[in-house]
Image (cartoon, grey):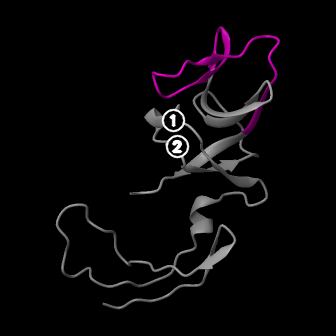
Amino acid sequence: MTIQYIRSVEVGGTSVPLLVAQTAVAAGYPSPAQDYFDGTINLSEHLIHDTTSTFIVRVSGCSMEGAGISDGDELIVNRARKPVDGSIVVAVLDGEMTVKRLRLTPRGVVLQAENPEYPDLVVGELASLTVWGVAETCLHQLN
C-alpha cells in the first residue's frame, strides 16, 4: 500500500497531516485493486467557500436531528451567504442564538425545528430576529 502524507491542514488551531485515497471507497465489497493512497487534498478548499466570513459553531441540543444535525456536531456557517426559504440558519431571536430551518410563509417568518418534539418558532412582529449566518456543512462525528 502506497501512503503519501499531504501538507498540514489546520483543524481547531492544530496542524494535522491527512492521507488521500486516489479512488472512491465502495460501501459494498472492496476492490483489491484499490489498496493504495495517492494525491493530496485541502479540506478548506472543499468545505469553506469564503474564508473571511465563515465560522464553525458547535450545536447544542437535538431540535435539528431530522436534518442530520445532532447534539455536539459542528456547523460550517457562512455569514455572507444570503438566507432563502429552506436555508438552515444560525439565528438570534430575542437575544437567544438558535439553529433552525428558515421558512418564509404568508403568516411571516418561522424558524422550523426538524424534530417533532420541538415547536416551530413563529417570529412575531415585535420580536428581534437576526440571521447570523447560513449553515453550509455539518461535521458529524462517527462513533
Residue situated in front as seen by the camera: 39 or 109: 109
The relative height of residue 21 versus residue 97 in the rendered view (above or below) is below
Q: Are marks 2 and 1 in contact (CB under 8 Å)?
A: yes
Question: Residue shown at 80%/17% (left/top)?
Answer: 127
Instruction: Classify mark 1: helix, strand or loop.
Output: loop
The relative height of residue 58 versus residue 52 in the rendered view (above or below) is above
Question: Residue shown at 53%/31% (left/top)?
Answer: 63
Question: Quick one: label 2, few (<14), some, or many (20+) residues within 10 Å?
Answer: some
Q: Is residue 43 left or right of residue 37?
A: right
Which residue matches tag 1? 62
Residue type indicated by callout 2: Asp
Q: Position of residue 71 (x, y in %)?
A: 52, 43
Q: Position of residue 88 (x, y in %)?
A: 60, 36
Q: Is residue 48 left or right of residue 38?
A: right
**Magenta-drawn stretch contains 118:** yes
**Magenta-drawn stretch contains 38:** no
The relative height of residue 60 versus residue 114 in the rendered view (above or below) is below
Dot 2 or dot 1, earlier in sequence: 1
Quadrant where the C terminus lies? bottom left
Residue type indicated by callout 1: Cys
Which residue matches tag 2? 71
Q: Is residue 62 left or right of residue 122?
A: left
Residue 101 in which image quadrant: top right
Tell me the distance, in whole angstroms, between the alpha carbons under discs 2 and 1: 5 Å
Instruction: Please state the extent of the stretch shown in magenta in the rendering.
Output: 104-132
Residue situated in front as seen by the camera: 137 or 59: 59
Q: Which mark is residue 87?
A: none
